[in-house]
Amino acid sequence: MTSATPVRLQPGDEAPDFDLIDDSGARRTLADLRGRRTVLYAYPAAMTPGCTKQACDFRDSLDALHAAGIDVLGISPDAPATLATFRDRDGLTFPLLSDPDKSVLTAYGAYGEKKLYGRTVTGVIRCTFVIDAEGRIEAAQYSVKATGHVAKLRRELGL
């Protein structure tokens, strides 16, 4: 996709397919998610302050999300080795997906033009998607805040 304006997925849309390597070197696909609800959240870069806060918030909410039948996956352009370091450093207990060419991030509308400190730049847009058990978008939240977002998502999901 060459458009400067990213796509915006809507509830009911089919979740874009993916086949990516995770932080442990395993392949993860959209088909693997069938039968369970999944939170897929996009973040700009492992081990940066905001991304660390958000990942730790998901880690700390994982028991409640799992109890509600919801899995969590993070996705960024970072290499699998960097994601493994992030996972180990912060005790993250959910898979982190590597999308180095940003094709999946682009398909989800999580890569493109955004405002950063008042300037327009191209990069990863912090987003969260809830994918239902059939592979459709249940919720798509764009330009979310790193801090407090997981608590807001849990409220919206009734957890």
Image (cartoon, helix red, strand yellow):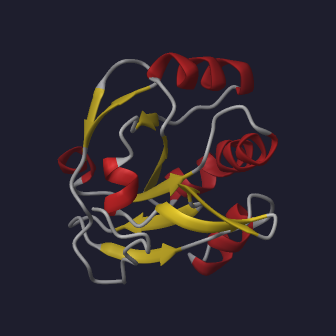
Instruction: Compare residues 31 and 98 and report the one nearer the observer.
Output: 98
Instruction: Name the side, left or right, on which 66 lies relative to 63.
Output: left
Instruction: Compare residues 116 and 131 and report the one nearer the observer.
Output: 116
Q: Residue at x 50, y 16 (%)?
A: 81
Instruction: Give coordinates of residue 132: x percent, y percent.
Output: 32, 68
**In the displayed structure, would residue 148 be above or below residue 10?**
above
Q: Residue at x 56, y 75 (%)?
A: 157
**In the displayed structure, would residue 11 be above or below residue 59?**
below
Instruction: Give coordinates of residue 126: x percent, y percent.
Output: 60, 60
Taking the view exactly as shown, the residue that stands out farthest to the bottom is 11
Instruction: Compare residues 25 and 102 and report the one nearer the observer.
Output: 102
Q: Residue at x 47, y 61 (%)?
A: 110
Which quarter shows the C terminus?
bottom right
Which quarter shows the N terminus?
bottom left
Instruction: Compare residues 96 and 118 and report the one nearer the observer.
Output: 118
**Total numbered labels:** 0
Instruction: Name the side, left or right, on which 30 lies relative to 50.
Output: left
Instruction: Give coordinates of residue 7: x percent, y percent.
Output: 37, 74
Q: Is residue 21 visible?
A: yes
Kindly indicate the quadrant of the structure image that contains residue 35.
Answer: bottom left
Instruction: Give coordinates of residue 121: x percent, y percent.
Output: 62, 60
Kindly indicate the quadrant of the structure image that contains residue 56.
Answer: top right
Q: Residue at x 61, y 68 (%)?
A: 114
Q: Is residue 37 visible?
A: no
